[in-house]
Image (cartoon, coloured by chain):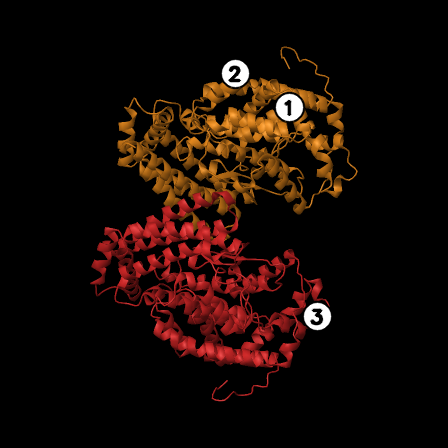
Chain colours: A red, B orange
Amino acid sequence: MDTMLARFRSVQKELWILQGMIALLAWDRATHMPKKAISQRAEQVAYLTALAHEKKTSKDAQRAVKALSKRKNLTAIDAICVKRFRKEMRKALKIPLEHVKKFSNLVITASHVWEEAKEKRRFSLFQPYLEKLVTMKLKEAGYIDAKKRPYDVFLDDFEEGMTVKKIDKVFERLKIRLIRIMQQITASEQYRRQKAMKLVFPFDEQRKIAADIKQRIVPDNDRIALDDSVHPFTTTISEDDVRITAAYRKHDPFFSFTAASHESGHALYELGFSKKLSGTTLYKAPSTGIHESQSRFWENHITKSKAFWQFYYPAYKKHFKALRNVPLDRFFQQLNLVKPSLIRIEADEVTYCLHVIIRYELEKALFERKLKVKDLPKAWNKKYHDYLGITPKDDSHGVLQDVHWSEGYFGYFPTYAIGTMYAAMIFNQMRKENKRLEKNIRSGDFTAVASWLQRKIHRHGATFLAHEIMKKACQKELTPDDFIGYLKEKYYALYQCKQVNMKGVTT
Amino acid sequence: MDTMLARFRSVQKELWILQGMIALLAWDRATHMPKKAISQRAEQVAYLTALAHEKKTSKDAQRAVKALSKRKNLTAIDAICVKRFRKEMRKALKIPLEHVKKFSNLVITASHVWEEAKEKRRFSLFQPYLEKLVTMKLKEAGYIDAKKRPYDVFLDDFEEGMTVKKIDKVFERLKIRLIRIMQQITASEQYRRQKAMKLVFPFDEQRKIAADIKQRIVPDNDRIALDDSVHPFTTTISEDDVRITAAYRKHDPFFSFTAASHESGHALYELGFSKKLSGTTLYKAPSTGIHESQSRFWENHITKSKAFWQFYYPAYKKHFKALRNVPLDRFFQQLNLVKPSLIRIEADEVTYCLHVIIRYELEKALFERKLKVKDLPKAWNKKYHDYLGITPKDDSHGVLQDVHWSEGYFGYFPTYAIGTMYAAMIFNQMRKENKRLEKNIRSGDFTAVASWLQRKIHRHGATFLAHEIMKKACQKELTPDDFIGYLKEKYYALYQCKQVNMKGVTT
């Protein structure tokens, strides 16, 4: 093999190995690490992160990429690898190392302070750190592309090709529809009469169910592990080593089930990249949004569907005494209870994206300097009131609830809604192509589902951008319509809504 | 601070960070890693190991060490760091990188083959790999010091300052005494009548006991984690992050208890180094033997003592229905049943060191070319017959039982017996200095015990060699006498031995 290509491949491989170990450090921190090791763990992560940055921007890597960029005789995959790597490398080179180090130190402190602030329910503790984070991110955006809108620069990290302009259009439509659906639901007789049953499920049994769901979605047990953590997540340590976690809540009986399904969807994606891409920069998802589409797909369209529960409920209820006398229909209603609530990750399918849109609008305002950090809690609470009709009782149930900002992630939130819309597009397309889909689900047979996802989405890795993959798979651009249609079909039936058309609005 | 010293400290710190991450990779492999990730894990370990080797032998490190070696104005600790580091660096520089890589690849394959051979109970599968391992280790010894006995070169890695000559003298005495004690025990009426009770303890309850024992020996819960693994071990990931594992056996009710106590002893040591040594090459135990003394101390002298069980049994028996009608004395006898057996890690206190001595004698013969690898199983079985009066039914209960050789560790086994003898020396010294020791143990109060160990042993890290620390703490050199005395006191009472003196032998 020629030297330049060999060198380029070895840089990619090194980065892959380093990323895997950084992922292991993070996974371990969240699962098994003793508490007091936190600052030593930060040192370990910083060490490998700096090393990865060094490798990515080394003279050696630069030379190889420069030489290969001019080549006409590369294979298609090598050519895309070079293109993608060059983009990432250039970005990394534009940010001064001093800035990177300062920011990563800031994040460590900010995360600690955020935890404390959340515990004490006081945003004012976190405020100065969030201000610093915003300032430094604005500076970073300037380094990368001073001509671009800063928020567009951030979006590029999570959803390449996506812009504020595009999101605004889609989210505006999504928001209006969701609010309208909520009006229909809350106006229903069913909604007025609904009551959350007090179901308490023993953790040990919840754990068995989580493991079972994982097994059904990712049948290859030897490439995945399931553990406990405070917040559920998925991470990849190597090609055959994906970890998911679930969390078990006493007062939220379905939380662990939903988390297990959601994270298994992520894991199946991570385990489905083509082996041809192994060791390259393309062995990953092209965007956070498309990743989220995979988790949302399994969570919403499969394991929260009526068809699934027709199959699963008899076995499921055997685990929980509390369900002994609960018939399927009543259970299904409980699982899919719609109710405006304060915490994003506990939200139902209908209100979920409103939580996301609120965060997006606030982030955008922050970075366009239309909103000051100190005014965030007020703005947050106002939006919750306007969109969801409820107001957080304190900051920890409001503006402090998510970890993202404390870790320096801005522009991440919209991908949750993008993924949710993608998932509905995928489900519709799959249904169109496979007339037996519902029957498959009703019999607990997910092979056709998994195979479709693998063929159309997973195997590509980052060979194409997310919207390219989606366009090919579903023959359309990002749209809220499939998701809106799905919600209406499912929830208008559940709530026996009359579907009165409001004037001028197509529901 | 002066540049050379700063550079030297930073190299030490980097190595410490790298070692911690290598330890995490190994811990994870044995506890939570999905099976299929094994070869990718090997790649990750190889990457960090090579990096550590590179850092340890870099021109930068060499220059700093060379310059600092000549300094007269270093602090005592810095001077010892330089001395110890130089020794390790020189050793690393003597072995060609090619040899290191080849050996580490051989170990990966050999470990796999060993596992298979053990499963299939066929030594012949493993034989060619063990031959290669022996050949490569002989070569390595030649690189390091061609004038030394190869086995002495290996011993230096585990027990600095120890030699075949010294061990032979101690082990010979130990062996004769142990065989004599066994003769006394097996001649007793009690022994002839003894029967192992069929106790089956549920794993969940065993787990609670393991966690409780860990908590009693290492009270600082925020610096230690306990997990399951096939073979119990202890590893250190950072200053405040030590992991121990326990294993749970259906047909060996005390195995997990013993493992938890043993590994907690290791962990307490790892957590007890002086913070002043943090980030230096002295932040570790000076030898494997002294490390083993800490695990053996807690395992044998504390948690297998009558005093301990007088305190612990009432709480313990509540966990296990099988013990409902078993009085303390009968239980204590069961826990301390002496019986020649085939598996080292399941052996009782009396026979344990005979298992170790057998391995030592065979290793020594291998490297002095007095024994061929192919003749190992026969030699193994003969020694088991001669020393313990039993013969393995197959290779997996014989020569294939331990992982050490497949991982390239030769010269490691003797440290198990050295540690056991050290532990008895420590216990005797502690008893001499603290008249309330037995009373402390009988009331479950281990603060004085832990504090003695911390003061006399733990805090020193590797500032002194093992035998120097032991000499200072116990005022004597390595001797089997304390251990032999301890065994007689405990087991002659348990077996009501008449202690008939055989001619010419002082028992």
Q: Which residue is tagged 2?
A: B476
Badge 1 amino acid: Leu
Mark 1: which secondary structure? helix
- Dot 1: chain letter: B
Quarter of the picture containing the C terminus of chain B is: top right
Q: Are marks 3 and 1 in contact (CB under 8 Å)?
A: no
Image point (63%, 44%), residue name:
B207
Extreme-right residue of the structure:
B325
A154 relative to B44, above or below: below
Query: Residue A16, position in %: x, y?
Result: 37, 54
Q: Which residue is tagged 1?
A: B437
Image point (61%, 57%), residue name:
A207
Which numbered disc flags the more N-terminal residue, 1 or 2?
1
* Marks 3/2: CA–CA distance: 74 Å
Closest to the observer: A319 or A95? A95
B166 relative to A161, above or below: above
- Dot 2: chain letter: B
* Marks 1/2: CA–CA distance: 21 Å
Q: Which mark is residue A326?
A: 3
- Dot 3: chain letter: A
Q: Are marks 1 and 2 in contact (CB under 8 Å)?
A: no
Extreme-top residue of the structure:
B504
Residue B362 is at least partly visible in this image:
no
Mark 3: which secondary structure? loop
From the viewer's perspective, tell me whether residue A38 is left or right of residue A498.
Answer: left
Count residues near mark 2 (Cα–Cα under 10 Å), then give few for <14, some for 14-19, many for 20+. few
Query: Residue A145, position in %: x, y?
Result: 27, 64
Looking at the rendered image, the disc whose residue lies closer to the viewer, 3 or 2, is: 3
Quarter of the picture containing the N terminus of chain B is: top left
Q: Which mark is residue B204?
A: none
